[in-house]
């Protein structure tokens, strides 16, 4: 089965397009991404999209309706589990599964507010360059 995903961040950004084939490589990559999250690591946009795509496919196969899928997806990954910028780059996702099923999901990873993003950045990066008074 082919899974196509279009990720749109801000309206002025070019969408990112992904195409996955559900095979052993896909399954292994999903498993490795889940392991990273279980170990407390942050995942990047590619890993987040992979995990979201796998979850959408599994929910569709289980017969869930679109409203239930959207609700499940939006609680799958928390902002603190991803690298900075991932929630903002995935504000709107469109999944085409096979040739007969499409679902659009808005804000699958809740965005922190700007102040919180700046805090996350300054906490991880700014400490190296801060001068002691």
Image (tube, rainbow, N blue to C red):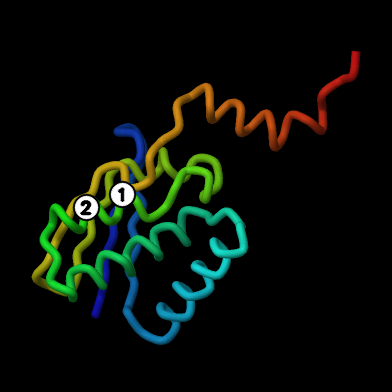
Location of residue 69 (image quadrant): bottom left
Q: Position of residue 72 (x, y in %)?
A: 27, 56
Residue closest to the far bottom: 24
User: As drawn, is 82 to the left or to the right of 98?
Assistant: right
Q: Determine the image quadrant of residue 106.
A: top left
Q: Position of residue 52 (x, y in %)?
A: 35, 61
Labels 2 and 1 touching (C-beta < 8 A): yes
Pointer 1 local density, CA inside 10 Å: few below 14, some 14–19, many at least 20: some
Residue at image coords 74%, 29%? 126
Q: What residue is shown with label 2?
A: 70
The quadrant of the picture occupied by the N terminus is bottom left
Q: Is residue 3 above or below residue 130?
A: below
Residue that appears at 45% across and 32% down: 112
Please name the residue shown 36% across and 84% down the image.
23
As rendered, which of 53 and 89 lies closer to the eye? Answer: 53
Question: Taking 97 as reference, is 1 above or below it?
Answer: below
The numbered mark at residue 39 is none
Disc 1 designates what residue? 74
Q: What's the residue at 49%, 68% (across, down)?
A: 34
């Amino acid at each position: 089965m082919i899974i196509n995903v279009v990720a749109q961040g801000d309206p002025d950004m070019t969408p990112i397009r992904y195409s996955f084939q559900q095979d052993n490589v896909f399954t292994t990559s999903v498993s490795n991404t889940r392991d990273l999250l279980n170990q407390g690591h942050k995942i990047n946009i590619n890993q987040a999209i992979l995990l979201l795509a796998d979850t959408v496919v599994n929910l569709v196969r289980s017969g869930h309706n679109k409203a239930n899928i959207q609700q499940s997806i939006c609680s799958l990954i928390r902002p603190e589990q991803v690298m900075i910028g991932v929630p903002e780059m995935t504000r709107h996702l469109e999944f085409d599964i096979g040739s007969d099923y499409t679902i659009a999901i808005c804000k699958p990873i809740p965005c922190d507010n700007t102040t919180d993003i700046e805090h996350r950045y300054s906490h991880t990066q700014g400490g190296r360059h801060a001068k002691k008074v």
